Image (tube, helix red, strand yellow):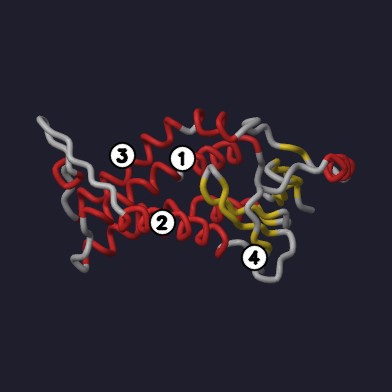
Amino acid sequence: MKIQNKIPKNDEHLHLNLIDNDWIPMKEPESVWTAIVLSIPFMLLNAIISIGIINVFSTISLSEFGLSSDSVSITINVGVIIWIFSLIILHELLHLLFIPNFIKSQKTFIGLTLFGGYVLTEEEISKSRYIVVTIAPFVIISIILPIVLSLIGILTPTIKILILLNAMASSVDILNVVLLVTQVPGKTILTNNGTKTYWKKTA
């Protein structure tokens, strides 16, 4: 595992080598901004799912977030910034934990950029594991966590906000899963060349 603040760039020589070895590149957004725009519908869907889960096991209202029909009260302090920063780290660590042998891997990268945190691996992993790696932060933080915390009575408004922020921030992850499921057949392995994803059928 390597820690660095720059996302690894696509290597043209590696691209040609992968193509020569029967790897097929996925059709993906050309830039981070394009991915963000395309993921907006999933941002709304993720938020609705998390709100629904919170509402089943606890309560959720606009007033908890400092909003009402006649006023808006939003307080941003150092504590809130620390919570958000911690959420970003937790989100990326959950991606990382599901990558096989990530500690020993020299092809797995983690870091922070202007767009937030990232985890990227150029190791070869199965399609099913790739999906697990991609959706783990959304499922654990925005679906399982509110259920657990509500059952033990510590699902506070601050945690609810963080859960919803994570749900919306996971929209690009869900977009990636949709692209993967619609393009890549079963019994395949995947790898990355920088941010570009490739797949190949297993024997």
Identify the image quadrant of the N terminus. Answer: bottom right
In the rendered view, does 97 fall on the left or right side of 54? right
Measured in 3D between alpha carbons, the distance from the residue under mark 1 to the one under mark 4, in whole angstroms, is: 23 Å
The amino acid on which the numbered mark 2 sits, given as a three-letter code, is: Leu
The amino acid on which the numbered mark 3 sits, given as a three-letter code, is: Ile
Name the residue: 26% across, 52% down. 160
Q: Give percent across and percent down for residue 147.
A: 28, 59
Q: Give percent across and percent down for residue 123.
A: 72, 57
Front disc: 1 or 2: 2
Q: Which residue is mark 4?
A: 100
Front disc: 4 or 2: 2
Do the residues under discs 1 and 4 have CB atoms within 8 angstroms?
Answer: no
Q: Counting other residues with Cα less than 10 Å from the Cα at mark 3, is it few (<14), some (14-19), or many (20 or more)? A: some
Q: Secondary structure at mark 2?
A: helix
Q: Earlier in the sequence, mark 1 or mark 4?
A: 4
Measured in 3D between alpha carbons, the distance from the residue under mark 1 to the one under mark 2, in whole angstroms, is: 15 Å
Q: Secondary structure at mark 1?
A: helix
Front disc: 1 or 3: 1
Q: Which residue is mark 1?
A: 171
Q: Secondary structure at mark 4?
A: loop
Q: Which residue is mark 2?
A: 87
Measured in 3D between alpha carbons, the distance from the residue under mark 3 to the one under mark 4, in whole angstroms, is: 31 Å
Q: Earlier in the sequence, mark 1 or mark 2?
A: 2
Front disc: 2 or 3: 2
The amino acid on which the numbered mark 1 sits, given as a three-letter code, is: Ser
Q: Which residue is mark 3?
A: 48
Q: Earlier in the sequence, mark 4 or mark 2?
A: 2
Q: Nearer the viewer, residue 10 or 187?
A: 10
Query: In the image, which disc is placed on residue 23?
Result: none
Do the residues under discs 1 and 3 have CB atoms within 8 angstroms?
Answer: no
Q: Secondary structure at mark 3?
A: helix
The amino acid on which the numbered mark 4 sits, given as a three-letter code, is: Pro
